[in-house]
Each structure stands twice: as structure tokens, then as C-alpha cells.
Image (cartoon, rainbow, N blue to C red):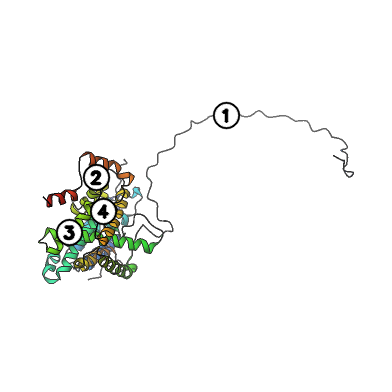
Amino acid sequence: MTERQTLSEEDANNLVVEHYGWAESIARSVARAWSLDWRLDGLDGAAMEALIFCSRRFDPTRGIPFKGYARRRIHEASTEAARKSKGWSRSASNKSAAETKAREISAELYGIFPDMRDGQLPVSEPSGNDDADMRAAVRELLVGASIVATRQAVSSDPLPDDLIDYRRMVGVMAALEPVHQWLLYKVYWDGLSLRTVATEWETDGLNVMREHKVLIAYLQKSMAQGKPGPTPKIRPGLKALMAKFKQEGSKGPFTDALRNASG
Amino acid sequence: MGKNKDDKKVGGVGSSGSTKGVKGTESVSQVERVKGAGSVKRVSGVGRVGGAGPLGAITLEQRDRLMALVSEEAEKLAAQGVIPKSQREVVEQAVKMVIDASLIEASDPDKKR
């Protein structure tokens, strides 16, 4: 691995001067989406700190443009500041309960789909039709948000309807192969990103991203039918894991949850 | 095969000029060893064909279209029972927030919310 070649302090400072307006515009975008004040709620400071940090770490010899390198980090710093801000908690009384829940879900979605921080929809396999790809990505986000919403509802004083929805969803997930159940569990229950799961499983990120898309399509179809549909095949890149889970005797976290619930 | 009347006989062959001489080739002074190819330091990701930016990239200009798409798809999914009807509003709003916060405004340091 080659050694990191960072900029001189003067060049790094120049990067900050050149990009601070851009970094603030990221903070403003986050504030706009969550109805916060980008200055009062401290998003401007967080974005600036992240910008300075990135300017010190930036290695121009790696061939990645500075904006491409820094955008995700500045966005992440802005959303973290937003979640810790007074405006975030203040909204619980001022804003509708639905808006507060929506914020919490959207914050979790960034963990699952971190490419959104770079302004990229989750498109892992382009079909050649941009509109169709955009729709598919939006559906993936909506179904993902629905899983998060159901899980969040159950973890905090659930209504009977929430419990029914939760059981229905878990029932559909429990029909999947253990490796697929673990993928969904790690993403939606453990809060790991798809890329982190891929790293943990020592496989290519695209393997996990494409498999996730297939699983979302399965969930969509099964939930619409009201019963589990034909379960998706396991992609060759994940077959070694399937063998591992079977060897360990794991039936999958959702199968176990249902079995425990029914005593 | 018959002979063509128009064919003319070759009158004769003049003697070819004698070769004056061949200069000796110069000796090869040095042969460098074949060097191994240097290893590829890094291969950067292939950009999207057509130069339309990274895969799935969205811009502020697409905002209205994207928001409409989210509403349309949320309605469809709720009608199919994929999204519980009680969650539809929250889920739709959450996805709109994620998209909205990903769309960067034009840089303007003096602009206030």
C-alpha cells in the first residue's frame, strides 16, 4: 500500500477557502430537508470542521477530486450535528409526530444507503432506462423505509396494528434462506450499511447491494400477495456464507424470532 | 495454350550493373535487458458511459420530478399492501427528506434559511 501524500498546510488552507461555500451548501441542504436552521442548529460549524479535517487528510495523488472525497464526510457531519441539535428534539412538540418519525427514519436510511450522501440513488445494476432505474431506486428506498418504520414502531410502545404489520413482515422474512435473513437483519436491525456488511462478509460490495435489491423485490411481492412468494436464489458470491450458516445450524434470526414467539 | 500474335519477343537482357560492394554492418554496441512492466498503481472506477456522471446521480434540477415519483410509488405500494396504510405518510416523507438532504443547493455563503 502506498503512503498517504497529504497537502502542505498552505495548500490545505487554500482548499478550505475554495470550498467553504460548497460545504455550507451541504449543511443548508440537510437543514432544509429536516426543517432546521443550518446556523442556529450548528450545522454550519460541523460542516466547516469536516471540511478542515478533509483538507488535512486529502491525498491528491489518489486521483479522486476533493469534492468527491469530502462530500460524504461533510454530509455525515451535518446530519450528526442535526440529530444532536436542539431543533431536532424541539420539533417533537412543535412539529407533527409524523414529521418527527419521518426524520428518524430518514436518518437511519443514510446508514443503509450511504451513497445517498453523495447524491446518488441506490442503482447497482443500470437497465439502460434512467427513468425505470430511478423508479426502482425510489421503491427500494420506500420499502427500506417501511421496514425501518415497522421496526421502530415495535421498539417503542407499539399499537396493535403495528404488531400485526411487524409479525406479517417477519413472517415473510422468515421464509428466506438464513444468509438472506442475516443480510436484512444486519442492515435493518443492527443498522449496518450494505457496504459494511460486504466488508464483514469479505465479499464484494456489489454482491450485497444486488442481493439486497432482490430481497426488497421479494418483500414487495410477498407483502402484496399477503404470503411469502418463491424465495430468491443465493448469488454465487454468497454461497460460501450459506454453507457457513448451515454448518453453524443457523436457521436465520427471523425464523428464530418466530419460533421463540410461538413458544 | 495458343500464342497471342501481338506478343512481342524479348529482344535480350542487358547485363545488370555489378554490385559495388556491401559495407559491413556496425556492431551492436549495447543491448538492454528487457525490463519488467511496472505494476499498475491504481485503477480508478470507470465513469458512466456518455458522461452522465456517477450511477444514480441526482441533481437539484430533478427535485420536483423525484418528489412526484416518491408520491406515485408510495401510493402504489400502499395500494398493494406493501407499505401499511398507517405508515404511508411517514414513509413517503422520510424518503423525500433523504432525497432532499442529498440535493445540494448552489454555493452561496451569504444565503440564509
Is label 2 on the same chain as label 3?
A: yes
Residue that label 2 marks: A200
The chain letter under disc 2 is: A
Task: Reply above or below: A170 against B34.
Answer: below
* Kind of residue at badge 2: Glu
Q: Of B31 and B93, which appears nearest the observer?
A: B93
State whether residue A158 is above or below residue B25.
below
Name the subunit of mark 3.
Answer: A
Residue farthest toward the left in the current orientation of the protein: A157
In front: label 1 or label 4: 4
Pointers 4 and 3 in contact (CB under 8 A)?
A: no
Name, please, the residue furthest toward the right: B5
Gap in Å between the C-alphas at discs 4 and 3? 41 Å
Q: Secondary structure at mark 4?
A: helix
- Give the image location of residue B22, x and y in percent: 70, 29
- As helix, strand or loop, the secondary structure at mark 2 comes to helix
| Residue A54 disc label | 4
The amino acid sitting under disc 4 is: Cys
